[in-house]
Image (spheres, rainbow, N blue to C red):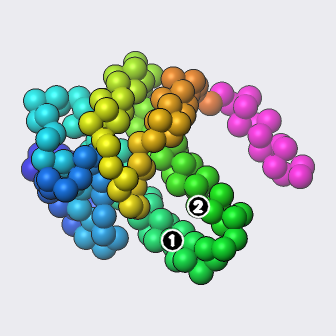
Amino acid sequence: NEWLREHKLKRTIQISVSDRITTPLTYKIFKPVIIFPKSTDWNDESSIKFVLAHEYVHIKRLDILWKVILIVILALHWFNPLVWIMYYIVNRDIELTCDEKVIRQFGDEAKSEYALSLIYMAEKSHKLTPLCNSFSKNGIEERIVSIMKLKKTSILGVVFASTLVVGG
């Protein structure tokens, strides 16, 4: 309740618990629900804090809407291997950018703790859940490597990238 009071949106956010999932996830677009697995260790406040921050970023950016759009495109073009590749890459990028946003929110000193909480959740996960990260070995490894390599953006880097984009 305290977290919900601190994180207000125009849309109402609910937090729920389910015994049908193994990793936290968010669903619904207009009245989003963050669902925790029944096996969640409620004493691990840092992990819960990271999960809530991660799912909040998904809610704010309407990532579930993008995932639904991706699934509709995939359903229409199921025969096209490039669409399958696009689906995989966009899902991966959604998770990586969400992780980056959480690390920027908590600071660089939280990288290892966040990565450890991802590893802990991956250990508990053994099912494939639709519309969310399946915590595959390669996917979780890529997320952790990305988290640990994340560096602050410098002004020089932003100017250089902007010059390349405008020049292109």
Q: Which residues are magenta?
A: 154-168
Q: Is residue 62 visible?
A: no
Picture residue at 45% right of the left edge, 41% below the top: 136
Query: Which residue sits at x=43%, y=32%?
Result: 103
Q: Marks 2 and 1, how far apart in space?
A: 8 Å
Q: Main secondary structure of the magenta part?
A: helix
The structure residue drawn at horizontal position 71% and vertical position 37%, both measured from the top left corner, is 158
Residue at 30%, 53% (x, y): give it. 25
Rendered position, 61 above or below 155: below
Q: Which residue is nearer to you in this view: 54 or 121?
A: 121
Q: Which residue is mark 1?
A: 71
How many neighbours does mark 1 have within 10 angstroms: few (below 14), some (14-19), or many (20 or more)?
Answer: some
Q: Nearer the viewer, residue 58 or 84?
A: 84
Q: Check disc 2 and report the residue beneath it.
A: 87
Q: Residue 15's x, y, as percent?
A: 16, 56
Which of 50/158 is in front?
A: 50
- For numbered disc 1, what is the local secondary structure? helix
Q: Is residue 160 magenta?
A: yes
Examine the rendering and report whether any part of residue 33 can be seen: yes
Give the image quarter of residue 150: top right
The disc label shown at residue 2, or none:
none
Which SS class for mark 2? Answer: helix
